[in-house]
Amino acid sequence: MELFADFFRELYENTGWNFIFLYEQYEFDRILEGMWVSTKLIVASLIFSLVVGFIGAWAQGANSKIIRYGVAGYIQLFRNTPPFVQILFFYFVLGNWVPTYDAGGYQEGYIDSFGWAVISLGFFAGAFNTEIFRSGIEAVPESTREAAEALGYTRLKSYIYIIFPLAFRVCLPALNNNLVNLLKTTTLAYGIAVPEMMYTANQIWSDNVNVVEMMIVLFVFYVGLVAVLVYGMHKWEKSMKIPGYG
Amino acid sequence: MITSLTRTALSAVILASFTLAATQANAANDRFKKVLDRGKLVVGVKADYKPWGFRDSSGKLVGMEIDMAQDVADALGVSLELVPVQSSNRMQFLQQGKIDLMIATMSDKANRRKVVGIPQPNYYTSGTNVLAKKGVVKSWSDLKGKPVCGKQGAFYNKQVSKKYGAKIIAFVGNAEAKQALRDGKCVAWVYDDSSIMADLASGQYDDYEMPMMTEDDNPWALAVPLDELDGIWGNFMSGMIYNWHSSGRLVELEKKWGIQSTQFVMDMNKRFEPYEAN
């Protein structure tokens, strides 16, 4: 380990390539924390966006006009505004309406910047997920729907047990795309000071003037993460394959 | 998939080394001539650092450092083009040859001298302090474990978090950081004492104070491309700075922009005052 650190210290002294986090404890801890926060942020907003999409797609077919218009308005609002604007809006505008408590000179909100990032990113990707799920639902044949009804399923039960599982298989490739997009969009959370990978890399290159090196690290980190996600999604797609369907 | 991953990583490395090679390939000592030939001097300045470099109500870049940039252009007899830069990218602008000169409130640091050319003497100095609501914090040790707003790219973020255990929340711009302070999202805003003084003088922060002893008084430097430092361009800029100090121009500019006179600028003015010839 010591040898490893020495190698990169010498690399810096001899060539100017400064991978400082590989030989300085403080920066190493910082980048590890950044990776961890990024991973948490990605997992949390992926799950949140899927839940939003699942509920949204169901609500789109609701009997109540109010719910249907509500969902349509939500989709228009989040699809037609830039995600960075949404994050800033959630944090600086909505953030002030959430109750806070005095934590000794500063106000601790019940939702912190990480929470706001998850909420805004989740709603952003959720709007797309809703539309993606809808495309899948519309691909389920009318006869299947009628068969479920004939078997005595309620609207909600048939959505959960019959329609959604079939729809999900149809829209997986499109969903895949959107989730990869969401993963990359999480870097915008640096705008509200969530200490994720982009933010951390920015801090490190500001302190140590090693922009090129940190850019490469960022690049490799996100290529790796996306590869893992895409690999997982493909595995999942294969395992859910129904012979003769889709 | 593994192979495509390695391929992407490899191309990133190759791309990066190309960029490095390109910056080194800049022929040295021709910047001065280039500026004269083109009839235009391109200077990187701050656009969010009142009163050194900021936008006035019409959107024009103005401030103390913009006046300094104008002085340089006037001395060369060329026109001036201003490029707004950020703390986190200003040195790259210079390395990549996008600007001829950078006057952007930069602290003079040993690791920065390896990257950009810093002509002596320094033109200004400032230290680290915080802006906080009255009575909230009294000393640096009060910041331990508490959220402190800052700006991405400032060198003292690391020092304040390392030395005093403050939890730095760094934003992209000053406006966001100060908004977070006003919203009470942090106990204090860590920044340059001289800039905080300007904020306090603006009358927008009557409930706030600058409670600490200023730390790390550090000189500011303007910068030229590294390989131009020992050439005409670096030496020309050294001369400009010398004359700013000697003629009292910087003292005059501080007054013009409502900045409290700094001891450093007054001392330098005295030190470089011309000998009274008989």
Image (cartoon, helix red, strand yellow):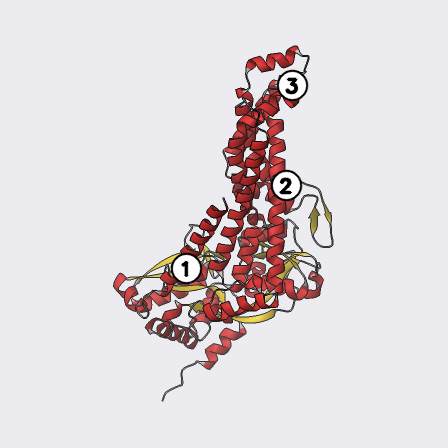
Do pointers 2 and 3 mark residues of a single chain?
yes
Q: Few, some or many C-alpha atoms within 10 Å of disc 1 (few <14, some 14-19, many ≥20)?
A: few
Where's residue A138, x and y in %?
A: 53, 20
Where's residue B77, x and y in %?
A: 29, 66
The correct choice, above or below, for A61 with respect to B61 in the image is: above
Q: CA distance from mark 2 to mark 3?
A: 28 Å
Residue at the image point whose x is 41% and y is 53% from the top: B60
Say if mark 1 contacts mark 3, CB within 8 Å.
Answer: no
Chain letter for mark 2, please. A
Q: Which residue is mark 2?
A: A44
* Residue B265 seen by the camera: yes
Q: Which residue is mark 1?
A: B17
Q: Few, some or many C-alpha atoms within 10 Å of disc 2 (few <14, some 14-19, many ≥20)?
A: some
Chain letter for mark 1, please. B
Q: CA distance from mark 1 to mark 3?
A: 58 Å
Q: Which residue is mark 3?
A: A158
Q: Residue furthest front?
A: A243
Secondary structure found at label 2: helix
Amino acid carrying label 1: it is Ser
The correct choice, above or below, for B187 with respect to B105 in the image is: above
